[in-house]
Amino acid sequence: MNTLLLMRLVIAHPIDFYFEIQNPRRIFWHQGFVLIALAFAIRMLSILMTGYAFETREPYEISWFYELVYILVPWLVYCIANWAVSAIMEGEGKFKEIFVGSAFALVPFILFSLPVTLLTNILSLEEADIVHTLTNLLFIWCGWLILIKIKILHDFELGKMLWIAVLTVISMAIVLFVGILLFGLINQFVSFVTDIFKEVRLRS
């Protein structure tokens, strides 16, 4: 089943979709990367096509690198955290299913984010609540697909599904905190070594 058919299935019949991808021949690793690339492209297009009245940043404040990091890092951290927590709690989902299934949970954002953005070109700021409400509904839709994924792939009951979701969020926070801490330490170490190297060169 190709990616477009699976995108239609996750929108129209999400429960059937997550049962379907438990068959290892239905999904492929590259589909996860393709969907994340699409989400990034849609995000950049949305930024470029946002109406003037709704813009909150100057063009020089927009970085494609940081926009990619804002999408890619949380997705990867979520996949790792959810797989680790679910494995400890005897979940049945495989990492490939979590990896690809989580990317497909972004399909509502990929398909409908741009039309919502285009509304900013015809609505006034007094009608901004419409845009904010539609944007929030898209994120809620994506979150709901994530919860369905956890329940079906790991075969959890409702209560355990919610508990795993909470533990996954806590695990993500820990992973991100440790990652930022390590990044800061490595950055300081590199600066320290660089300063020593410059000092040696000046004295030689």
Image (spheres, grey):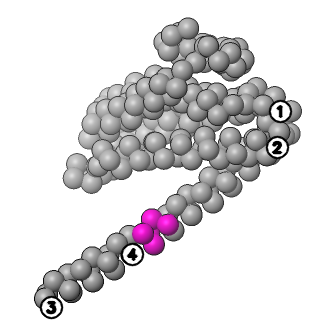
Q: Neighbour class for label 1 at 10 Å: few (<14), some, many (≥20)?
A: some
Which is nearer the N-term, disc 4 or disc 1? 1
Which is nearer the N-term, disc 3 or disc 1? 1
Examine the rendering and report whether any part of residue 11 can be seen.
no
Q: CA distance from mark 1 to mark 2?
A: 10 Å
Q: CA distance from mark 4 to mark 1?
A: 44 Å
Left or right of 20: which side holds 44? left
Magenta: main secondary structure equals: helix
The reply to whether the C-beta atoms of the residues labelled 4 and 2 are less than 8 Å apart is no
Residue in front for this viewpoint, 96 or 203? 203
Q: In the structure shown, which secondary structural element does the residue marked by tag 3 occupy?
A: helix
Q: CA distance from mark 2 to mark 3?
A: 59 Å
The reply to whether the C-beta atoms of the residues labelled 1 and 2 are less than 8 Å apart is yes
- Which residues are the magenta region? 182-186
Q: CA distance from mark 3 to mark 4?
A: 21 Å
The reply to whether the C-beta atoms of the residues labelled 2 and 3 are less than 8 Å apart is no
Quickly name the residue at label 4.
Answer: 189
Quickly name the residue at label 2.
Answer: 89
Report if residue 196 lies within the magenta region.
no
Q: In the structure shown, which secondary structural element does the residue marked by tag 4 occupy?
A: helix
Residue in front for this viewpoint, 11 or 76? 76
- Amino acid type for the residue under numbered disc 4: Phe
Residue at point 21%, 86% (across, down): 199
Can you say whether 130 is above or below 192 in the image? above
- Is label 4 or label 1 in front? 4
Quickly name the residue at label 3.
Answer: 203
- Amino acid type for the residue under numbered disc 2: Met
Left or right of 160: which side holds 132? left
- Amino acid type for the residue under numbered disc 3: Arg
Quickly name the residue at label 1.
Answer: 156
Q: CA distance from mark 4 to mark 2?
A: 38 Å
Which is nearer the N-term, disc 1 or disc 2? 2
